[in-house]
Image (spheres, rainbow, N blue to C red):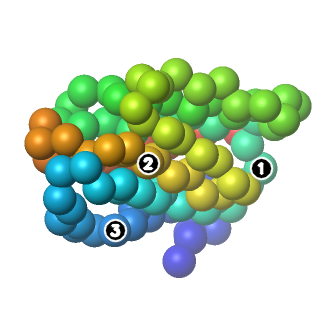
């Protein structure tokens, strides 16, 4: 539940934990809910403190600015971001974090 404070933000990640075999496709989801409209949103996928992929959205521009390696496939739909790893490799194991920054 979001608090009624200015700029309140809630970020949820799915799945909490996933195990896959090497070569499989992995999809990580991040949902963002906010109490106020934002002007600029920056969503970063981070693995073990290292930034992997960044999506920057401006409310005035329909096209997001994306910076990711070719093997990582980000997608954005309304308030949900997905990061797909195709194919999964042994070195992909680790802790992934979806980090969201808003300008309101």
Apparent side of residue 81 relative to residue 20 in the rendered image (left or right): right
Can you tell which mark lies on residue 84? 2
Q: Quadrant of the C terminus?
A: top right
Report the side of 73 relative to 63 (left or right).
Answer: left
Discs 2/1, front: 2
Q: Are marks 3 and 1 in contact (CB under 8 Å)?
A: no
SS for callout 1: loop
Indicate which disc residue 15 carries: 3
Q: Nearer the viewer, residue 54 or 100?
A: 54
Q: Nearer the viewer, mark 2 or mark 3?
A: 2
User: At x 33% / y 27%, what residue is drawn?
Assistant: 51
Q: Earlier in the sequence, mark 3 or mark 1?
A: 3
Residue holding disc 1: 37
Q: Is residue 86 above or below residue 16?
A: above
Left or right of 64, for residue 67 = left
Q: Which of the two discs, 3 and 1, sits closer to the camera?
A: 3
């Amino acid at each position: 539940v979001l608090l009624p404070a200015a700029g309140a933000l809630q970020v949820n990640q799915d799945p909490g934990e996933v195990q896959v075999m090497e070569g499989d496709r992995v999809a990580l989801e991040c949902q963002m809910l906010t109490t106020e409209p934002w002007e600029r949103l920056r969503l970063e996928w981070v693995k073990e403190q290292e930034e992997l992929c960044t999506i920057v959205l401006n409310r005035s521009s329909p096209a997001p600015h994306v910076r990711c390696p070719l093997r990582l496939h980000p997608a954005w739909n309304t308030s949900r971001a997905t990061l797909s790893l195709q194919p999964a490799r042994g070195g992909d194991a680790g802790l992934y974090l979806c980090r969201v920054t808003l300008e309101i």
